Amino acid sequence: MSRRHIHHASVTRRKVLVGAGGAVVGVALVTACGGGSAPSGGSATSKRPGYGGPAAGSPDASSSAGTALATVADVPVGGAVSAEAADGRPVIVAQPTEGDIVAFSAICTHKGCTVAPEGSRIACPCHGSTYDLTGKNTGGPAPKPLPGLEVKVVDGEVVES
C-alpha cells in the first residue's frame, strides 16, 4: 500500500511541475506577442526610444495646442521616432520628406504588436509586417495601414491636435 501511495504522490508532483512550467511559458508568449511589451530588438518597452521630453501628466507635458509627442529636430528627414501619446498609446512620428510631419498608431494591424522605426521604414518585430513612413502597409501579414493621428507643429514641437 505504501508503494502505491508513493507512486500516486510522484504523479501529482509531476503534474504540478508540468502545469507550472506551462503557465510560465504561456505568460512569456502572451507578453512577447502583444499582451505586454514587445520583444527586444527595436521593440517597445515602458521606456520607448525617441522623444525624451516631459512625461505625460507633468507640468510641461502639454500646451494649449495639445500634447507634445516629439520635437521636429528629433524626427529625421526620411525617418521616424517612437513616442507616447498623453494617454500612454505608443505612436510613431515620421518625416517622410523635409517639413512633412505625420504621426500614426504604433500598433500593428496584424496582431497588435508594437511596431518600431527601422531606418526609412516601420517594422513589426512579431510577424514581419512592414510599413512606409506614412503608415501604409508594405509587406508581411498586416491587412491595412496604421491608423493616422492628427498632429501639427507648434513652436518646433509635434503636438496632437
Image (spheres, helix red, strand yellow):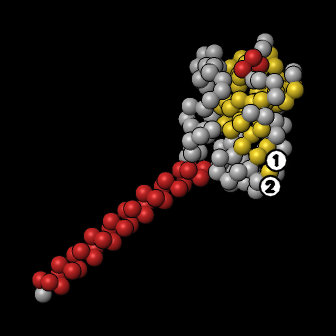
Report x, y in % for residue 58. 58, 19
In the rendered view, tell whether residue 37 sits above or below residue 75. Answer: below
The quadrant in which the C terminus is found is top right
Given residues 125 and 160, the one toward you in this image is 125
Mark 1 and mark 2 lie on one chain; the one further toward the N terminus is 1
Q: Position of residue 24 (x, y in %)?
A: 42, 57
Given residues 136 and 161, the one toward you in this image is 136
Q: Which mark is residue 143?
A: 2
Residue 61, image quadrant:
top right
Identify the secondary structure beneath mark 2.
Answer: loop
Crowd band around label 1 with a 10 angstrom C-alpha radius: few (<14), some (14–19), many (20+): many
Q: Is residue 44 left or right of residue 140?
A: left
Please tell me which residue is depicted at 12% across the width and 87% down the height of the picture. Answer: 1
Q: Quadrant of residue 111?
A: bottom right
Q: Which residue is mark 1?
A: 137
Q: Is residue 35 left or right of residue 63?
A: left
| Residue 131 appears in the rendering | yes
User: Mark 1 falls on what kind of element?
Assistant: strand
Q: Position of residue 114 (x, y in %)?
A: 66, 43
Q: Which residue does the image show at 60% across and 16% down from the upper left?
A: 59
Find the residue positioned furthest to the bottom.
Answer: 1
Residue in the image at 80% along x and 55% along y: 143
Amino acid at the residue labelled 2: Pro
